[in-house]
Image: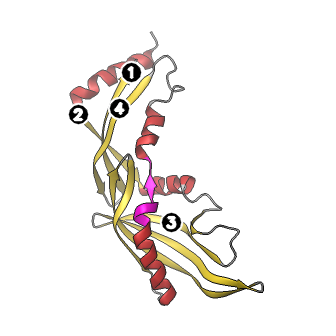
Amino acid sequence: MDCVPLRLTILVLLLPLCARAVELHLQYGALERMLAEQMFTQDGRRYVRGSQKAKCNFAYLEHPHMQGDGGRLRIHAKFTGRTALNLFGQCVGMGDAFDLTILATPHFHDGTIGLKDITVASEGKTSFYIRRVCEAMASSLGHEFRYPVSAEARKILEDPGLHPGYQRELRNFTVPEIRVADDSLVLVIDFELTVR
């Protein structure tokens, strides 16, 4: 018998004896790369309104940086946006580019990690447009930001390419606790894995 599947089988058999939950520490650098790969996909930008083709009515975030802040997640990003009308080829209206800080509490719901208790503030710059952008983002980020952690775990743990002779099934995946540490986001994960 191959040694790797034997070790996997023994590990799977011993997991219920050791603990029900597993802690996953996601370092902020790794989390930033995951977000870049999955959400900031348009030349490193995440459009929150409009698209690259919109000349006068668009908004996007770029260069996200994450860290812990007293049990909450602090995300620094650059915002660029414009709310204007195209009059004879010229954009007439408001717009600006500024650094902002998003402060939020991550939570698990319906298989995804989302954000709640969100505040958004400009870093050192203010105007009517900036205040409106921060208010709009604080109310919309809770609905728009969702990371499908359950689906990602299923893809990883049930991957037939890992050990083709063994079929795996992930069930009852949940994240009963999320902690924001100084260096990482800590997910306490509970699940069942059946190996056939």
Residue type (three-letter) at the residue carrying disc 2: Ala
Residue type (three-letter) at the residue carrying disc 4: Arg
Q: Position of residue 134 (x, y in %)?
A: 44, 78
Q: Position of residue 56 (x, y in %)?
A: 67, 79
Drawn side of residue 131 relative to residue 73, left or right: right
Which residue carries the number 1 mark?
A: 195
Q: From the image, state whether disc 3 or disc 1 is nearer to you.
A: 1
Circle 3: element type: strand
Q: From the image, state whether disc 1 or disc 2 is nearer to you.
A: 1
Q: CA distance from mark 1 to mark 4?
A: 11 Å
Residue type (three-letter) at the residue carrying disc 1: Val
Question: Quadrant where the N terminus lies?
Answer: top left
Q: Position of residue 17 (x, y in %)?
A: 22, 26
Circle 4: element type: strand
In the image, residue 107 lies in the stretch drawn in magenta: no
Q: From the image, state whether disc 4 or disc 3 is nearer to you.
A: 4
